[in-house]
Image (tube, rainbow, N blue to C red):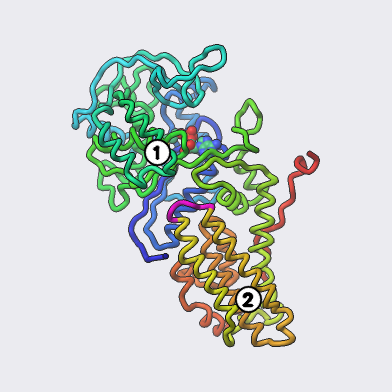
Amino acid sequence: MVETDTTPFYITTAISYPNGRPHIGHAYEAIAADVIARFQRLRGRHVRFQTGTDEHGLKMARKAEEQGRTPADLADEMSGYFRAMCDALNISYDRFIRTSEPDHHRASQAIWQAMEASGDLYLDRYEGWYSVRDEAYYDESELVEGEGGAKLSPQGTPVEWTVEESWFFRLSKYQDQLLALLKTPGFLEPASRRNEMIAFVEQGLRDLSVSRTSFDWGVKVPGSENHVMYVWVDALTNYLTGLGYPGDMGEFWPASLHLIGKDIVRFHTIYWPAFLMSAGLPLPKKVFGHGFLLNRGQKESKSLGNVTDPLELADRFGVDALRYFLMREVAFGQDGSYSPEAIVQRANGELGNAFGNLAQRTLGFIAKNLDGYLPAIRGHDPADSALFEVVDRAITTEIPDAFESLAIQQAVEAWLQAVFACNAYIDAQAPWTLRKTDPERMETVLATLYICIAQLAVAISPVIPASSGKLLEMLGVPEDLRNLQGIRSHWYSPLAESDYQLAPPTPLFPRLELPAEAESA
Ligand code: ME8
């Protein structure tokens, strides 16, 4: 049920490595987080939403070196593309953080000092395997054999033998607390990701190397200036920086949800909670590890030449069509696949034919036959209450419950079922026939549809904010009622009784054509 819940909701995405331009996986994560943030705002919650770029570490330093530029220069350029992607995709972030920013250096040094004050940091010598691609240390026992016997990380990335003086964090001290945390229902979702993390902790945690001396692109270790922090220590701290740490973080900490991909669950559910425990800070309420997005079932890579620029997809198909497709197609939490044909099919079939046409037919009919004056409800028919019930159940229970449990695909499906019910109603009631036979009944039917369409526009607005906004504007729904509570209030009759006149509707979802190369294939 939709209850008025005004508690704070702090949601974050992973911060991306700006060592290249954003890919579809980055867009997917940003969109999913945005949908959840917008849904929580719709419920009335006080939302803060942060995303950004993770700019330090060896991966960035090496990429810059390859290109003959400074890491700062590379980060400046690429971070700009990530921000531009967020803006183009209508991502409603409150802060786009860059870890090269001065307040982030201060926050990282502060958490370091808090961990040091707890006696959890000590200087020693690190000898072991490091994957620059993953920015991760691995135990010999975790490595797998690649082609020609090469040692690879469990993610299949190259590792290099590293020997350095390093600060260590007493991860082992937190073993029992971490195990209890991982077993706490709801902390790590989907639950299917839990066993792997529990097994990792149960096999015994080794202390973690948390500084490097062989390069200097990072946050300096306080009092140990020849060391920079291990990039994950500073990266994870971004979640606090954005709230003003080490100052008062206000109402938003602990975070309600860290939304991340499945490959970085270990960092968020083992290392991060341990750092927070050490620093004496509350732990995030939930970490959700979403699946990976594949291009026609294949991982995108430069060597396969199948890397897609998410902005090209958005340009070609429309931002809302892309957002809708990604949320509708993939069971959130699992891996999913996309292709231009699949995007076109969903967008045309579900947004265009099912929802767009419903709005077009209803509003067009009112504009044409009633001169745009809104029809009045004149009498009752069981078919009307049946439709109201279906839509009401969708917007008060099915859709919010699904969004709340991060079952985004299910939320969209529940919405679509309610749209289908409206289409079945318009076909059965046939207002075009009633126009001649029973004009009063025609008015009731159109008014019923008008109200349902407005409610469904609000319910799907987290997924397709621009199109929903345009539709609600056309419908004349007052802005302060475009939320889950407001849209169920008594707004229709006052609007219908006012001199509001509906303009002929403009199409919401232009029909998409299949890309040329797919047609010829
Ligand atoms: O991991 N499908 O950055 P990143 C879906 N800087 N999601 C994907 C994906 C795909 N094909 N590929 C990557 C980092 N992602 C760190 C995070 S957080 C304190 C630091 C997801 O640029 C990935 O799982 O490699 C991660 O959540 C996000 O994109 C950024 O990945």
What residue appears at the point 72 percent right and 56 percent down from the top-left corner? 511
**Placement of the C terminus among the 4 image quadrants:** top right
Of residues 39 and 285, which is closer to you in this image? 285
Q: In the figure, is residue 299 to the left or right of 211?
A: right
What residue appears at the point 30 percent right and 36 percent down from the top-left corner? 179
Compared with residue 84, is residue 211 higher up or lower down, i.e. above or below? above
Which numbered disc covers residue 502?
A: 2
- Which is more N-terminal, label 1 or label 2? 1
What is the residue that sits farthest to the right in this orientation?
A: 520
CA neighbours of label 2 inside 10 A, class few (<14), some (14 to 19), many (20+):
some
The amino acid at mark 1 is: Arg
* Tally of marks: 2
CA neighbours of label 1 inside 10 A, class few (<14), some (14 to 19), many (20+):
some
Q: Secondary structure at mark 2?
A: loop
What residue appears at the point 44 percent right and 16 percent down from the top-left corner? 160
- Of discs 2 and 1, which sits in the foreground? 1
